[in-house]
Image (cartoon, grey):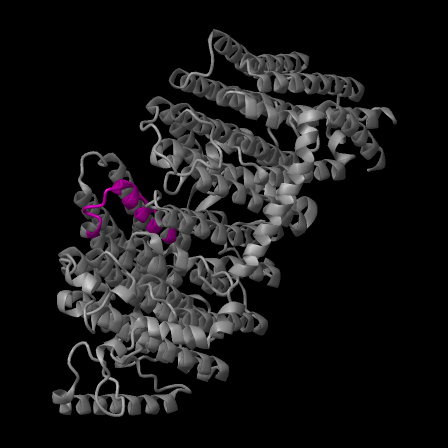
């Protein structure tokens, strides 16, 4: 061991060490899948859940074990036996791989822990569930660990198939099946962009390894666009985002994994990885920035009008992914740091929010906010955890969401992208609106009559621990973001070829870049918040009773019947944004395309069916004559 | 600048052994399935074993006239199999199949004789006559567009395993014969590459569009066979090592998955006692394993990883790029997108969702096991394709 306690680089011992550890996460997950199948008839649902959780945790540990080497700036690589003829099975793990590997296995493990009791009484076959969940996680780990682009595409599609089968887990329900169909069609078809890009790269360079300099030399704008299209569909970028709200009829842990760690983040990885393959011209950055900003806006505007808790969170994912992509699109070290930190943070707080929504649905049997309310009393632990994650997504100081938004705004200011700052700031306000709406509608106010008659209980212990772990990290990385920034994000940004000039302090207050002025502004915001808290404390005695809304109406509080509800809010937002909803819903265009294809198919069948049934011989002889003519002509 | 991943194309004995093995495995699967889900009486068993056995034997005797004769005989026995179904539709379909098959055999034999032995083209105009006859012959036999008329009728009228035998063993046997021809009489393709590519694209799109119009799932599978055959033909038309290798890998995947797809439909039809159409929603509720086999088979059929179909498909797309640039590749992708649409439509109209009516519970475990074994084999081959692609070349 050297002075830092690591094995010396290039030593025979390190080679042996690397040989095992670099594939250990995938090996553990593979073993977990096999064990699930082997013990499917022996273990009960809870046992299968524990087995899956232990598998995820062990894989997380294996990914974590790579951290010291990667933090030192040494990427790990290994080539194994040929996979297909002389195409190698090559593994390459750098800082970027590790960011996503940690998210997939770490957040994935917390979600699997949550599943232990969530899926305990599931009547459907839970072996299928856990096998798919572990394969889902393996798919993302494979995607980010493999250097062979064909295998990258294989993992890309494995993730896609897992999401299809998991969204359609309750396949006997029409809503689940239809949602799964939309996921498959809308993400698989654009995914061919990635395959064609890989084949074009191979055609030009003769290599399938993205680490090969010849591949970088062959990278072009056309290839960038093809990969971007594939990434946009996976990462719910406008206009390829409309599948995600329909995917909400899955078991909630699936939604959590899909939104936080394994699915939508695959596209983010792909966009970030393109920095390894080529130096981006300004036009590429601008394209990504425009897509990112439009997505930020569209997602938030649609989130405002939702009354289904999970659909609201789904639209919020679209908006949040826009932030992440915008960070990457800035193309500076601070921008990339912001994008990747935001990506990790989003995984934590969005995972938590979904798990809380799942706990609410599990307990009340509904996720319709019109039929929810006052749950904080019955579900105090869930409500507390929700509040932490809600604060994080809004960007309240002391949470990781604040640091992420701060970094992003700072990076945009640094890059002189004023429009990005305005969009990000404006949508932060929207985010606060819709998240507060969800919070109040679900956890506060008067409990509706339909819930009063139900026996509502808080989340089960394993669910609480899973949620708390993620929420705890939201706070930890909000208080000490440098832990994540220096340990995980910095190697990733440096690995993409950028200099690292980002300094992160406690609480994530940037003081070394263009955001100094903003930092001062933030100080004022914090002061205002403290002042507000003081006012609240002083006026405690005059607060309205439960059931009444804390609106100042010019006199006495409003009567119960006049309270503002989620529906009222949604209705006014819907009314205000009607033209926006009409013009920004691409489903209308997809429907026109589908109807056109169907009409063409119907007409073709009308023409060919009689020929096929009544005159096959005559038609065949005519066709033989046509073939003769064609041979002579061509 | 491209370095081929392939050393060379390994036609001849390597393919013969490989396909003899593949066909033997598929014939065994068809017969085991038929034990669980009866396909016909003694006549069906005899003709199926004879027909399948002839195809296997033809790949054991090696290339030459004997193989052609055995493959033709196997196809004629398949006509008898369709006839044996006894229904009016089946006999009418058998008649069409027979007439077109005879026409195909005449054209193929005449084309081969005129084309002569060896790799050089005969003098004009015999070269063009030979090429036209070969295109017409193989077009009729393989149901390429626009000469596909027998296939939807046969698939609609025959028992599922009869269709599977025809599509997966007899047709693929004929396709391998065409692939052998590609490596021996290269001028047949090289001098008319545009025409072959045109037919391949036409077959792909006509098959895909017509499949999308169907509401009967067996007819949809027939048109999807056409669609897939277009891809395989494109690989041969491209003529590069990667194209031919993709076509052969694709043919293996096609053969396996078509048995799975026809088998799943047959099992559900037999147990439910009704013909599967797009009105039968939610069949997976009663037949979950069979439904899973169909869904995985459909996904494998369009070349989605990690199934072996992907190993063939990426080679074919690459061959498309080599031959016609990105536009040909994008055309192939567009046809695949159509294939995804019609398969997904079938999956969601027939198998998934809430069942429209309560069907007789319980599925044949033996038949379901056969289908799942075939799917697992294709999955294993897709995850570790080296051993199989090594044999293809």
Q: Is residue A139 magenta?
A: yes
Q: Residue at x 32, y 76 (%)?
A: A394
Residue B243 x %, y %: 62, 37
Q: Is residue B384 visible?
A: no
Taking B68 as reference, is A292 left or right? left
Residue B322 image-quadrant placement: top right
Q: Position of residue A632 (x, y in %)?
A: 85, 33
Q: Nearer the viewer, residue A513 or B135?
A: B135
Magenta-drawn stretch contains A583: no
Residue B123 position (above or below residue A415): above
Using the rendered view, name the quadrant where residue B266 is placed. Answer: top left
Name the one closer to the observer, B4 or B183: B183
Residue A455 relative to residue A439: left or right: left
The stretch in magenta equals A118-140
Q: Position of residue A408 (x, y in %)?
A: 40, 77
Nearer to me, B17 or A440: A440
Residue B126, percent from left and from top: 85, 24
Determine the image quadrant of residue B134.
Answer: top right
Q: Nearer the viewer, residue A225 or A17?
A: A225
**Count of marks, rendered view:** 0
Where is the C terminus of chain A found, in terms of image quarters?
A: top right
Residue B184 as seen in the image, left or right of residue B224? right
Q: Is residue A200 visible?
A: yes
């Amino acid at each position: 061991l050297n002075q830092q306690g690591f094995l010396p680089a290039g030593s025979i011992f390190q080679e042996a060490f690397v040989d095992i550890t670099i594939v250990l996460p995938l090996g553990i997950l593979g073993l977990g899948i096999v064990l699930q199948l082997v013990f499917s008839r022996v273990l009960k649902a809870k046992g299968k859940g524990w087995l899956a959780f232990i598998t995820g945790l062990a894989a997380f540990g294996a990914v974590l074990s790579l951290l010291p080497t990667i933090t030192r700036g040494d990427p790990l690589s290994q080539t194994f036996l040929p996979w297909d003829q002389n195409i190698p099975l090559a593994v390459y793990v750098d800082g970027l791989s590790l960011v996503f590997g940690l998210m997939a296995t770490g957040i994935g493990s917390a979600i699997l822990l949550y599943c232990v009791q969530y899926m305990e009484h599931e009547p459907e076959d839970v072996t299928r569930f856990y096998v798919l969940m572990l394969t889902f996680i393996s798919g993302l780990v494979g995607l980010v660990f493999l250097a062979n682009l064909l295998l990258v595409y294989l993992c890309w599609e494995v993730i896609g198939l897992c999401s299809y089968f998991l969204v359609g887990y309750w396949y006997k329900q029409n809503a689940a099946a239809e949602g799964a169909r939309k996921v498959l069609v809308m993400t698989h078809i654009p995914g061919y962009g990635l395959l064609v890009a890989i084949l074009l790269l191979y055609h030009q360079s003769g290599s399938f390894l993205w680490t090969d300099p010849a591949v970088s030399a062959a990278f072009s704008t056309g290839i960038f666009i093809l990969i971007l299209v594939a990434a946009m569909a996976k990462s719910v970028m406008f206009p390829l985002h409309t599948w995600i709200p329909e995917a909400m009829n899955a078991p909630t842990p699936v939604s959590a994994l899909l939104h936080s760690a394994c699915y939508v983040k695959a596209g983010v990885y792909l966009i970030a990885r393109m920095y390894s393959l080529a130096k981006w011209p300004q036009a590429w950055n601008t394209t990504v920035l425009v897509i990112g900003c439009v997505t930020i806006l569209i997602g938030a505007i649609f989130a405002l009008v939702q009354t289904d808790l999970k659909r609201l969170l789904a639209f919020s994912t679209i908006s949040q992914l826009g932030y992440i992509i915008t960070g990457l699109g800035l193309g500076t070290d601070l921008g990339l740091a912001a994008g990747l930190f935001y990506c990790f943070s989003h995984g934590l707080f969005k995972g938590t929010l979904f798990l809380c929504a799942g706990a609410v649905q599990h307990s009340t049997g509904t996720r319709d906010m019109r039929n929810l309310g006052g749950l904080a009393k019955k579900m105090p632990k869930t409500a507390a955890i929700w509040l932490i994650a809600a604060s994080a997504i809004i960007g309240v100081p002391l949470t990781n969401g604040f640091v992420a938004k701060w970094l992003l705004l700072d990076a945009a200011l640094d890059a002189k992208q004023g429009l990005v700052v305005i969009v990000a700031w404006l949508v932060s306000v929207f985010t606060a609106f819709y998240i507060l709406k969800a919070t109040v509608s679900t956890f506060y106010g008067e409990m509706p009559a339909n819930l009063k008659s139900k026996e509502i209980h808080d989340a089960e212990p394993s669910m609480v621990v899973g949620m708390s772990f993620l929420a705890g990290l939201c706070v930890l990385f909000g208080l000490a973001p440098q832990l994540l920034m220096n340990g995980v994000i910095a190697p990733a940004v440096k690995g993409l070829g950028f200099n690292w000039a980002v300094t992160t302090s406690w609480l994530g207050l940037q003081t070394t870049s263009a955001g100094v002025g903003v930092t001062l502004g933030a100080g004022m915001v914090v002061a205002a918040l403290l002042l507000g808290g003081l006012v609240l404390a002083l006026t405690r005695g005059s607060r309205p009773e439960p059931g009444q809304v804390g609106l100042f109406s010019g006199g006495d509080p409003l009567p119960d019947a006049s309270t503002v509800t989620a529906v009222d809010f949604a209705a006014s937002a819907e009314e205000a944004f009607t033209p926006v909803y009409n013009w920004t819903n691409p489903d209308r265009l997809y429907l026109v395309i589908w109807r056109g294809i169907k009409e063409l198919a119907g007409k073709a069948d009308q023409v060919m069916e009689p020929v096929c049934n009544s005159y096959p011989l005559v038609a065949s002889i005519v066709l033989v004559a046509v073939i003769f003519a064609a041979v002579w002509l061509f | 600048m491209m370095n081929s991943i392939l050393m060379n194309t390994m036609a001849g004995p390597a393919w013969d052994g490989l396909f003899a093995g593949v066909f033997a495995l598929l014939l065994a699967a068809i017969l085991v399935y038929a034990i669980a889900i009866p396909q016909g009486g003694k006549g069906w068993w005899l003709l199926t074993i004879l027909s399948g056995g002839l195809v296997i034997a033809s790949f054991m005797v090696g290339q030459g006239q004997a193989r052609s004769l055995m493959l033709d005989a196997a196809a004629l026995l398949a006509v008898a199999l369709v006839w044996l179904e006894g229904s009016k539709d089946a006999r009418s379909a058998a008649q069409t199949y027979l007439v077109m098959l005879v026409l195909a055999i005449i054209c193929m034999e005449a084309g081969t004789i005129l084309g002569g032995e060896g790799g050089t083209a005969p003098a004009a105009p015999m070269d063009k006559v030979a090429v036209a006859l070969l295109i017409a012959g193989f077009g009729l036999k393989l149901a390429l567009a626009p000469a596909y008329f027998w296939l939807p009728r046969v698939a609609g009228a025959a028992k599922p395993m009869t269709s599977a035998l025809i599509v997966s063993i007899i047709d693929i046997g004929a396709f391998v014969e065409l692939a052998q021809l590609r490596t021996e009489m290269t001028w047949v393709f090289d001098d008319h590459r545009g025409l072959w590519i045109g037919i391949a694209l036409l077959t792909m799109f006509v098959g895909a569009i017509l499949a999308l119009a169907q509401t009967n799932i067996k007819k949809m599978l027939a048109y999807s066979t056409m669609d897939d055959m277009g891809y395989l033909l494109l690989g041969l038309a491209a003529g590069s090592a990667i194209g031919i290798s993709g076509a052969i890998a694709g043919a293996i995947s096609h053969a396996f998955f078509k048995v799975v797809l026809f088998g799943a439909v047959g099992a559900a039809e037999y147990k439910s006692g009704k013909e599967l159409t797009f009105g039968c929603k939610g069949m997976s509720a009663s037949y979950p394993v069979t439904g899973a086999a169909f869904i995985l088979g459909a996904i494998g059929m369009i070349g989605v990883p990690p199934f072996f179909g992907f190993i063939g498909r990426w080679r074919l797309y690459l061959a498309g790029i080599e031959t016609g640039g990105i536009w040909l590749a994008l055309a192939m992708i567009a046809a695949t997108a159509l294939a995804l649409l019609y398969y997904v439509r079938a999956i969601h109209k027939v198998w998934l969702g809430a069942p429209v009516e309560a069907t007789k519970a319980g599925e044949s475990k033996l038949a379901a096991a056969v289908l799942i074994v075939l799917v697992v084999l294709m999955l294993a081959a897709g995850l570790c394709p080296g051993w199989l692609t090594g044999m293809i070349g």
